[in-house]
Structure formats: structure tokens, C-alpha cells
Amino acid sequence: MARGPLYDPFERQWRWLLEYGNAREKALVHRLYVEPRVRFYCPYPTSNEIHLSRNTAYPWDDNGMPFVVAESDGTYSVRNGDGGVHVRVTIDEVAAGLLALLEQLEPPRRSDRRPKDLPQGRDRRWRSLATTSSDPEVRFVAERLAEEPEVRRYYPYTSMSNVKLSRNDEYPWDDEGLPRLIRREEGEYVVVDGEGELRGTGGLESAVAAFVRLLADIRISTRGFQQTFCEALQHGGGAGELLEIVCRFKRLGLGQQEAYDAIDALRPGLPEPVEDLLVEVLDIVTGWCSPKHRIWEATRSG
């Protein structure tokens, strides 16, 4: 069944918990659902102990996000990003405690970074990759790549799966168009660009140098973003899918104002439901780039 223009996984997940959760889940979700800051940081709440800050893009255990747990004794606890219990309280107090922890995620100066991009989450993932892998070569490669600013920029939330260090060159890369560094047998490394073309081979140092050069040369065009965005609209993509496209191109270097202008240019002549969807997306983009708003205020109204 084709998805309509109002298909929205953000709304769907919240409403699913409101409708099908148990009594304690419904009470907690109903209270947190009206908080814009919670909706922004926690677009995909789950019923897995109500880990409301846990979702596919920003897992709490990797980026230091706080989360809420419905305890077995009938109370609720707000835990910080390391899992430590912060408070154990009633529903109204748990909402206040979660909001207080989310406030601490705000950078001291205005920034367009989401919580996954904050230093504590970014560094934790790199440290984990460089210290916990059972493969000595993987640890060595992770330590070497972590020294390169361009690598840290494009892979802030890194893992073996997205740097592609251990996958072969036939593995299809995603549509972000990023190059990849591939580890082959006996210490040989291959660098492949975003279109799959071979751009370098040899030892680790030479391959890392070629890898970094490709990352430094990446330029994201507004036209490419707008085309990808239009394609998503044409097949009925909802707000969740459209925001994923914005986040992907944002990570690759597209400016917030450029994203806003490209989306706003699509509005004339669209049916009202589709235009309303674009306005919803633009509200979030505006929150990222407007000096009048903090990032946690950039969300849909409850």
C-alpha cells in the first residue's frame, strides 16, 4: 500500500504508544508527548522500558542522552546518558527531571549540532572502537583515523559498519555518496569514492591519506539536495523521511539556510496537505538556523 503525503513515523510511534501501551506507559507518554523539547530529542519513543530517548538515529547508550524507565515498583526514573539513576519520582516530576537533563545538552553557544554530535557522544564511540575491538588491527586503524579532523567530521558517530573498514568493495554504499576505506587481507587497504570507483590502494598510511583527501573534496550542491527531497515527496514520503534527508545532507556540509531556501522554493503550486507537510519540516529547519531559536525549540507543536 502506497504511503500518503501525511505518513509520519514520528507521529505514528507516539500515537501507537498512546493507544496500545499499558496503563503506565500511556500515562507517561501522554505527559511527555506535549513537551516540544522531548518530541525533538526523542522522535521515536519505544515501549522497551519507555526508553524515550532511544531511537534508530541517536541511541541513548552511545551519545549520552538521558532516558526514562518505568520501574517495576510503580515509580519512574530518569537516568543520565551513562545509565545512572538521576531521579525516581512521579509522572509530573519525571517530566521535569527529563527536561532538566535535556537542557544540559544545549551547547554553551548557539550551534546547529544535534545531541549525537556533542563531544561526549562522539568521543565515546571512537574510544569504544579503538579500545574494545577484539581485532588488534581494527583498534590500530581506529586510533589512526581518529587523528584526522575530516574523518571525525564526516563520521562523528562512527562504527565499523559505517566506516566500512571490514567490508569488501562490492558492498553497496548508501546514497550519502561518502568514500569508504576497505581493509583487505594481509594489511592492504583500498579507498573507493562515493560512486564506487577505486581511488587508492596500499598500506594504511597511504590509504588514510587518500581517504582524507576524498573527504576534504566533498561538496554538496543545493540542487542535489532539492532533487533528492523532491523524489521523496513524489513517492509519498512523510515528515520523518524528509527530515532524514535534511539531516543526511546537513552532515555532508549543506548549510541550514541553503536547505531552507531549497525546500521553500518547492511550496508554490503544491496541494495544501503537501504544503503543510513542507511547512512542518521548515519549522524544524528554521529552528536549526535562526538566531532567535535554540535547537530544542525547533519542533512541531504538540
Image (spheres, helix red, strand yellow):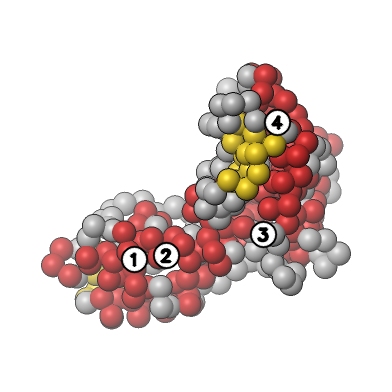
Specify which label sits upstream in the sequence, 4 or 3. Answer: 4
3D distance between C-alphas at marks 1 and 3: 25 Å
User: In the image, residue 195 lies at what x, y percent?
Assistant: 40, 61
Task: Report the amino acid beneath label 2.
Answer: Trp
Question: Residue at 51% of width from left, 63% of height from top?
Answer: 122
3D distance between C-alphas at marks 1 and 4: 38 Å
Specify which label sits upstream in the sequence, 1 or 3. Answer: 3
Nearer mark to the viewer, of 3 and 2: 3
**Is there a contact, CB below 8 Å, between mark 4 and mark 3?**
no
Give the secondary structure at mark 1: helix
Relative height, residue 47 to residue 23 (above, below): below
Relative height, residue 279 to residue 292 (above, below): above
Q: Where does label 4 land, which residue? A: 29
Instruction: Left or right? Give the position of 62 relative to 260.
Output: left
User: In the image, residue 15 lies at what x, y percent?
Assistant: 69, 27
**Is there a contact, CB below 8 Å, between mark 2 and mark 1?**
yes
Q: Categorize mark 2 by other alpha carbons within 10 Å: few (<14), some (14-19), many (20+).
A: many
Tell me the quarter of the picture where residue 190 sits. bottom left
User: In the image, residue 13 lies at what x, y percent?
Assistant: 64, 31
Q: Where does label 1 land, which residue? A: 130
Q: Where does label 3 land, which residue? A: 105
**One can see residue 161 in this view:** yes
Task: Report the amino acid beneath label 4.
Answer: Val
Task: Report the amino acid beneath label 1.
Answer: Ala
3D distance between C-alphas at marks 3 and 2: 19 Å
Q: Where does label 2 land, which residue? A: 126
Task: Report the amino acid beneath label 3.
Answer: Leu
Specify which label sits upstream in the sequence, 1 or 4. Answer: 4
Question: Residue at 52% of width from left, 48% of height from top?
Answer: 83
